[in-house]
Image (cartoon, grey):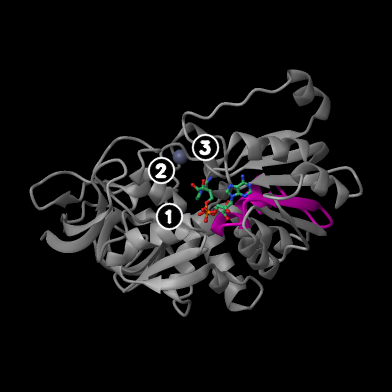
Amino acid sequence: MSETVRGVIARAIGAPVELVDVVIPDPGPHDVVVRVQACGVCHTDLHYREGGINDEFPFLLGHEAAGVVETVGAAVTHVSPGDFVVLNWRAVCGECRACKRGRPWYCFASDNASKRMTLTDGTELSPALGIGAFADKTLVHERQCTKVDPEADPAVAGLLGCGVMAGIGAAMNTGNVSRGDTVAVIGCGGVGDAAIAGARLAGARTIVAIDRDPRKLTWAKEFGATHTVDASAEDVVARVQELTDGFGADVVIDAVGRPETWKQAFYGRDLAGTVVLVGVPTPDMTIEMPLIDLFSRGGALKSSWYGDCLPERDFPMLVDLYRQGRLPLDRFVTERIALDEVERAFTAMHAGEVLRSVVVW
Ligand SMILES: NC(=O)c1ccc[n+]([C@@H]2O[C@H](COP(=O)([O-])OP(=O)(O)OC[C@H]3O[C@@H](n4cnc5c(N)ncnc54)[C@H](O)[C@@H]3O)[C@@H](O)[C@H]2O)c1
Ligand SMILES: [Zn+2]
Ligand SMILES: [Zn+2]
């Protein structure tokens, strides 16, 4: 039986989000209905609202979520009603060319629910990142659900579903930060601070946090930054070199995603070092550089999609590290808000007042 719940949608570019009735269809064979307990507000939700991802409006926003499995389709074996799960947007298919080559963290055909959630007039909704969790309940594929320690706070655990995992994974998986490395992170929002926490966990020796908002730099230290650079007042490349014996960092992570920050990452890196782009540029952005610099500086220029994570491997492990006091995941939760406060949370995010606002039920 389909049911109607409340959900937050973006109807058109730039229009304020709306709290409306959303119809959840009966789950298909491999689908499950999850009762959402918490969902973080990510910059990517705002990118959707601003038409920066695609134009398949209306979107059902929200994708950094944890909750409890409520109803399961006839063929579901991966989870059962009552399981506490973190939702993911990489439900590894096992069949695509990336999976077949043994690189499932690139899976190009991640599974989603077989049916669409709709408005009451039948209009199909596009769930953000195939999730759509600014809603009392949401419909996802069974393998979009990853079981984690049910003792974990849903508001904290849910953040692993996107930005925090993207940041930690940008450092640990994509950047392959190792013991003794020097690391610089440009942009210290939720994703950048997670990269800092990941670099610390991996044993980085020097971690330089870079932001143009001094408040963000104060928070970055709580996640493990050893040095900070105010990008609004200082020369970022020169400062990173100065803090790394004049050479540049082994790994520089761009958690902003703009041409100027990517260039700082490129030039703030030691010879043969690694650049990781985890911030998402908009389609209009371009970059022009001397090709000889790309050759002569060598190294690896990588992008990080979702921190190259494998949810089934990484989510339970990171929740355990959090529960053991080794990863300060709770510090990402700046405020807990109600479902009708998402628009206000976008404003707070834009003003740099929060790392994460988390909708809780
Ligand atoms: N690759 C992925 O899989 C993935 C996943 C989630 C989010 N993201 C992207 O990561 C980016 C960051 O997300 P967030 O939630 O942390 O956003 P956020 O808005 O919370 O943080 C961005 C930070 O960058 C700082 N900043 C902006 N311009 C800067 C500049 N020129 N120099 C230095 N600092 C600057 C801001 O002050 C802010 O602290 C977004 O583009 C988001 O879409 C990527
Ligand atoms: Zn695949
Ligand atoms: Zn996100």
Instruction: Name the residue beneath numbered marker 3.
Output: 281
Q: Is residue 32 visible?
A: no
Q: Report how far apart the C-alphas of labels 3 and 1 lie in the structure.
A: 22 Å
Q: CB of mark 1 within 8 Å of CB of mark 2?
A: no
- Asked whether the beta carbons under mark 3 and mark 2 sit within 8 Å of each other, the answer is no
Dot 3 or dot 2: first in sequence order is: 2
Q: Which residue position is annotated with label 2?
A: 110
Looking at the image, is mark 1 or mark 2 earlier in the sequence? 1
Name which residue lies at 62% across and 64% down. 215
Mark 2: amino acid: Ser
Vertical order, 338 against 47 (above or below): below
Q: Do labels 3 and 1 touch, CB within 8 Å? A: no
Residue 185 on the magenta segment: yes
326, above or below 162, in the image:
below
Q: Which of the two labelled residues, at mark 3 and mark 1, occupies the earlier sequence position?
A: 1
Q: How many marks?
A: 3
52 on left or right of 275: left
Q: Amino acid at mark 1?
A: Asn
Residue 45 shows in this picture: yes
Image spot of residue 352 (x, y percent): 52, 59
> Which residue appears at 44% of the width and 55% of the height?
42
Quadrant of the rendered image holding ligand 2 = top left
Separation of residues labelled 3 and 2 (CA atoms) = 22 Å
From the image, tell me which residue sits under label 1: 88
The quarter of the image holding the C terminus is bottom left
Kindly give the residue lying farthest to the left in the view shown.
121
Q: Which of labels 3 and 1 is toward the front?
A: 3
Q: Quadrant of residue 146?
A: bottom left
> Which residue does the image show at 73% across and 19% down from the upper left?
291
Q: Residues within 10 Å of mark 2 (few under 14, many from 20)?
A: many
Please report the bounds of the magenta region as a residue range.
169-192
